[in-house]
Amino acid sequence: MATALAATNHVAMADLKGKVDPDWCPGCGDFGVLAAVQKALVELQIPNYNVVTISGIGCSSNFPGFINTYGMHTLHGRALAVATGVKLANHDLTVLVTGGDGDGFGIGGNHFVHSMRRNVDLLYIVMDNQIYGLTTGQTSPTSRVGMKTKSMPFGNIEAPVNPISLALAAGATFVARGFSAEQKHLTELIKQGIQHQGFSFLDVFSPCVTYNHDNTYQWFRPRVKKLEDDPAHDPADWMAAMGKALLWDEEIPIGKFFERTDLPTLHGAEPVLNAGPLVHADSQIPADVSRAFVEELM
Ligand SMILES: Cc1ncc(C[n+]2csc(CCOP(=O)(O)OP(=O)(O)O)c2C)c(N)n1
Ligand code: SF4
């Protein structure tokens, strides 16, 4: 549960520090993502009591425990489904969803596609380390062909998912990629993703230093190129974004691939929510009946 802010109501890094310190391996890319999310909330001055961080299961999905916002650590692959419910119940909240490539693109792949076509207004950050970290190093949907892992000791035989082109094809209205070692750039993308009205997808290269010895910081550093440094790149151009999404190996773009702001969000399109967030609506159910129902669930 989020702790109330200091009387000044100024949001500082200390307000966002979780009660539990991260138990990630030293050097894990997820530390950089956590710091960038905290910095983004400070720079946008969003108080922690207005933020909910929701995850599935995985090393990266332990994230809500390490940040002082409201939070839910849900089931493997189900974070986006829960987050959709949270946003529809109270669309005044800033909803962040955090997790890994296995959680989001494997078991959660169905929710990933449908949340994007529905344009649910949230920021989905995938800490993409191209491996299952928590379960000690199996092939994930973004592992490259030939990569040797515990589950494919002779090399991966499956073509990887391309999260950026998948998100573009599924109708995401904000699509970006960051690198956890590029803090300033990543923080900027998180800020833009939070401010975007609609589904914001942010794939972040977040190296697993323990189980992935192929996609290391050293491997990414010379390859990543910021889209913002390309004066010809226009984030409103979907076809161009798709072309950039297909680049890999020698040059891997990071930055904002695509954004459109002309489509309604799911809560904006739902007439029932026109009068305001559902949590403030009178349910017309007697208090003792709703209390008994909640107690039964607890
Ligand atoms: C229904 C279900 N199936 C499988 C698992 C086991 N499991 C836990 S985390 C995980 C994958 C973690 O990989 P990823 O989502 O990429 O996150 P990372 O640990 O790399 O951050 C798996 C298969 C589970 N917890 N629940
Ligand atoms: S196993 Fe990998 S993903 Fe998990 S905490 Fe360690 S470095 Fe990070």
Image (cartoon, rainbow, N blue to C red):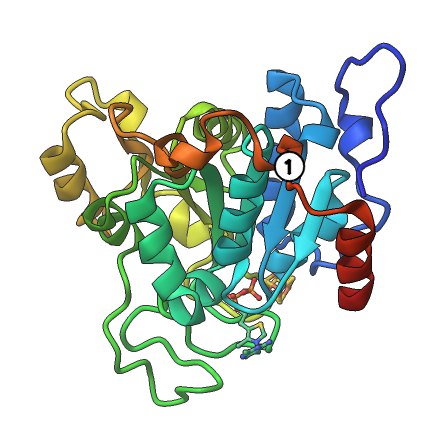
In the rendered image, residue 102, in percent from the top left (x then y), is placed at: 46, 67
- Which residue bears the numbered disc 1? 279
Q: Nearer the viewer, residue 23 or 267?
A: 267
Residue, far right: 7
Quadrant of the rendering where the C terminus is positioned: bottom right
Q: Is residue 66 left or right of residue 221?
A: right
Binning the other alpha carbons within 10 Å of mark 1 as few (below 14), some (14 to 19) or many (20 upward) gives few
Q: Is residue 128 left or right of residue 170?
A: right
Callout count: 1
Q: Is residue 35 visible?
A: no
Q: Quadrant of ligand 1?
A: bottom right
| 25 lies above or below 185 | below
Q: Is residue 121 visible?
A: yes
Identify the residue at horizontal 50%, vertical 31% (top origin): 190
Residue, far bottom: 154
> To which quarter of the image does residue 133 belong?
bottom right
Identify the residue at horizontal 33%, vertical 83% (top origin): 155
In the rendered image, residue 169, in percent from the top left (x then y), is placed at: 19, 49
Residue, far top: 8
| 151 lies above or below 268 | below
Q: Nearer the viewer, residue 293 or 202?
A: 293
Quadrant of the rendering where the N terminus is positioned: top right
Identify the residue at horizontal 75%, vertical 19% (top origin): 11
Q: Is residue 22 left or right of residue 165?
A: right
Q: Secondary structure at mark 1?
A: helix
Type of amino acid at the residue the image marks with label 1: Val
| 132 lies above or below 7 | below
In the rendered image, residue 276, in percent from the top left (x then y), is placed at: 54, 26
In the rendered image, residue 212, in percent from the top left (x then y), is placed at: 49, 67
| Label 1 beta carbon within 8 A of ligand 1 | no
